Image (tube, helix red, strand yellow):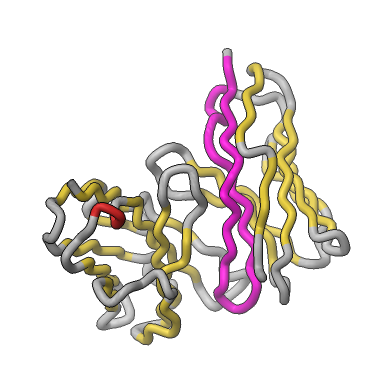
């Protein structure tokens, strides 16, 4: 069964600290993996997208890694800011248009 | 604004009423998706269009749900005889067959059935 699992479910950190979110998937075939940021009550916004051959992709303070052998990805946030408070969703594309979504990690950054 | 546009942003309706949502995708995108998201969960796939053709419908899309994309541009999602369980955020996304086909999401329509 195609699944995407994320951990932790929720996370609270202090402003300025780093954190790492995890994503494990069993989607096959694999096309690409994306991380989205979703603010409360709004649609998801893409942070990074990685294909099978890409191990690391950065977008400002966000760095995503992909290990296609172990089917794991991580999203590392450096020097967190209050505006990073959101849900972070891992999405795996299993074909031409199929997107399998994880349930997300809810991040809260405190001042 | 050239992003994906959804209307209305919020809808409150009484149980049993019909509702219709509209999605205007990014103009050059030929793929359009509808998703439903409940609180604390990731989006769940509802249906997918390539141009005007509806190529896939999820089992979640009961007979009360219908989606159209008549001219391959905007799309509508109609829910008939709404139930309280239909309360959710309905997200629309679009993508192109060119490049990586990254999906861009609209802001969603929040439906509350009372």
- Find residue B105 and report its image quarter: bottom left
Measured from the top left, where is residue B53 in percent x and y?
A: 37, 86
Kindly identify the residue that appears in the image at 73 percent across and 30 percent down.
A19
Q: Residue B15 or A27: which is nearer the viewer?
A: B15
Left or right of B94, for residue B74: left
- Find residue A72 and report its image quarter: bottom right
Does residue B19 show up magenta in the picture? no
Kindly identify the residue that appears in the image at 41 percent across and 50 percent down.
B38
Measured from the top left, where is residue A81 in percent x and y?
A: 60, 24
Q: Is residue B113 above or below residue A50?
A: above
- Where are the magenta residues, as a range? A82-110
Measured from the top left, where is residue B28 in percent x and y?
A: 42, 72
Q: Residue B105 or A22: which is nearer the viewer?
A: A22
Q: Is residue A6 above or below residue A49?
A: above
Left or right of A94, for residue B8: left
- Confirm whether residue B3 shows in the render: no
Q: Residue B38 or A21: which is nearer the viewer?
A: B38
Q: Is residue B1 above or below residue B64?
A: above
Kindly identify the residue that appears in the image at 68 percent across and 38 percent down.
A8
Measured from the top left, where is residue A3 in percent x and y?
A: 65, 62
How many marks are shown on the rendered structure?
A: 0
| Residue furthest out toward the right | A69
Kindly identify the residue that appears in the image at 69 percent across and 42 percent down.
A7
Left or right of A20, for residue A83: left
């Amino acid at each position: 069964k195609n699944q995407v699992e994320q951990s932790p479910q929720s996370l609270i950190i202090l402003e300025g600290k780093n954190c790492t979110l995890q994503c494990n998937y069993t989607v096959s075939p694999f096309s690409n993996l994306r991380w989205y940021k979703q603010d409360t009550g709004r649609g998801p916004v893409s942070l990074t997208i990685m294909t099978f051959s890409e191990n690391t992709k950065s977008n400002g303070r966000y760095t995503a890694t992909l290990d296609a052998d172990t089917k794991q990805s991580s999203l590392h946030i450096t020097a967190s800011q209050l505006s990073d408070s959101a849900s972070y969703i891992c999405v795996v594309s299993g074909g031409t248009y199929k997107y399998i979504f994880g349930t997300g990690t809810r991040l809260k950054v405190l001042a | 604004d050239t992003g994906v546009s959804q209307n209305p942003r919020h809808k409150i309706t009484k149980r049993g009423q019909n509702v219709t949502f509209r999605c205007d995708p990014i103009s050059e995108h030929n793929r359009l998706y509808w998703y439903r998201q409940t609180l604390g969960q990731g989006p769940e796939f509802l249906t997918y269009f390539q141009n005007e053709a509806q190529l896939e419908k999820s089992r979640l899309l009961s007979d009360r749900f219908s989606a159209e994309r008549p001219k391959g541009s905007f799309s509508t999602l109609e829910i008939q005889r709404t139930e309280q369980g239909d309360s959710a955020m309905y997200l629309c996304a679009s993508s192109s067959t060119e490049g990586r086909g990254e999906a861009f999401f609209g802001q969603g329509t929040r439906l509350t059935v009372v």
